Amino acid sequence: MRRRPGLSARLKLTLSYVGFLAVAGAALLAVVWAYLLRYVPDNSRGLLGVSPNRYLLVHTFVPAAAVAMACLLVFGLVGGWLLAGRMLAPLTRITEAARTAGNGALSHRIRLGGRQDEFRELSDAFDSMLQRLESHVAEQQRFAANASHELRTPLAISRTLLDVARKDPTRNPRELVERLHVVTTRAIDLTEALLLLSRGGSGELTREDVDLSLLAEEAAETLLPLAENRGTTLDVTGGAAPTHGSAELLLRTVTNLVQNAVVHNLPEGGTVTVVTGTDGNTSVLRVENTGRSLAPDLVPTLVEPFQRGTGRTRADEHDGVGLGLAIVAAVVRAHDGTLDLAARPGGGLRVTVRFPRG
């Protein structure tokens, strides 16, 4: 936005300092005139015939007062300019940091020293904003790179299959179609997951009253055949957990959590427990599953896009694209909720989601 040039803040402060000194000096002279000179007699003999009269005092006082006022204004101009520059120096550093950040250098920090005041608060807030922004941009760049890599893989496989089929016309086309179907389905699932992740991270949601317990039952009913095929016991308990949000996204969240719990479980005899309820002003959904032991430093990274975790990848038809918990985290943030992941002592994972109570 282009603006017309105007006075700088430093010059405005300097002029305000000079104006204040001028008013204060004029008031002081007025007090001297009102309370001192009026008691001096205005006659040729003066006071008691010794002291000068008012006429002489006025003619000697006014030039001296004018010189004093001129010196006061010069002092105020110079001193105000220096003082304003010193006071506005932190603001200048903040402005330079803002320009640097505007040019793309988000790693720059102000780190303004000194004791706490308004400028230090502004500097600290700006540094915190830059840190969050740099982290967000880096996360988006990693996400874009990983998404490109994940999308390129099925496309490269499809091209390879087509090249092989073109070079070998005698190859069974049914096998080619089946393999292309699997690869294409994976690419579609990845694309839909990316779109859902983008939508879940936005604040534009159609909200309605939702009961997490009903969503948990629906997700369990949908995934029950998968759990039975894997020999996993799926148990849903608890009471009503009302909240307010997008029923579609919340259902996808619950489904992702339950599916992850079923897939990343013991080969046989595993269990998945889903519990819903309320805790004060929040509605709680807790999903626990048995499985392999997880390192504590690995658990927080599971919500990052394309992070499956060591020992958690399954190479079958239910092998995901590494976006399940990332989608959950995005939807939870969009609904002002909290997501907590913890490794179970005996192996497996405990996921607790809290939403504002509806």
Image (spheres, rainbow, N blue to C red):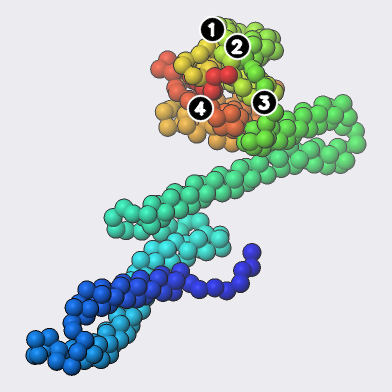
Determine whether, in the image, residue 39 is placed left or right of residue 300. left
Nearest-to-viewer mark from 1 and 3: 3
* Residue at horizontal 8 percent and vertical 90 percent from the top: 50
- Which amino acid, mark 4? Thr
SS label for mark 2: helix
Q: Are marks 3 and 2 in contact (CB under 8 Å)?
A: no
Visible in this render: residue 312? yes
Q: Nearer the viewer, residue 63 or 194?
A: 63
Q: Earlier in the sequence, mark 3 or mark 2?
A: 3
Residue 245 vertical position relative to residue 123 in the rendered view, above or below = above
SS label for mark 3: loop
Q: Are marks 2 and 4 in contact (CB under 8 Å)?
A: no
Residue 287 vertical position relative to residue 337 in the rendered view, above or below = above
The residue that label 2 is drawn on is 213
Determine whether, in the image, residue 327 is placed left or right of residue 88. right
SS label for mark 1: strand
Q: Nearer the viewer, residue 86 or 193?
A: 86
Image quarter where the N terminus lies is bottom right
Residue 207 is labelled as: 3
Q: Which quarter of the picture shows residue 33?
A: bottom left
Q: Residues within 10 Å of mark 4 (few under 14, many from 20)?
A: some
* Residue at horizontal 45 percent and vertical 59 percent from the top: 108
* Residue at horizontal 58 percent and vertical 19 percent from the top: 358
Determine whether, in the image, residue 200 is placed left or right of residue 159. left
The residue that label 1 is drawn on is 238
Residue 311 vertical position relative to residue 86 in the rendered view, above or below = above
- Which amino acid, mark 1? Gly
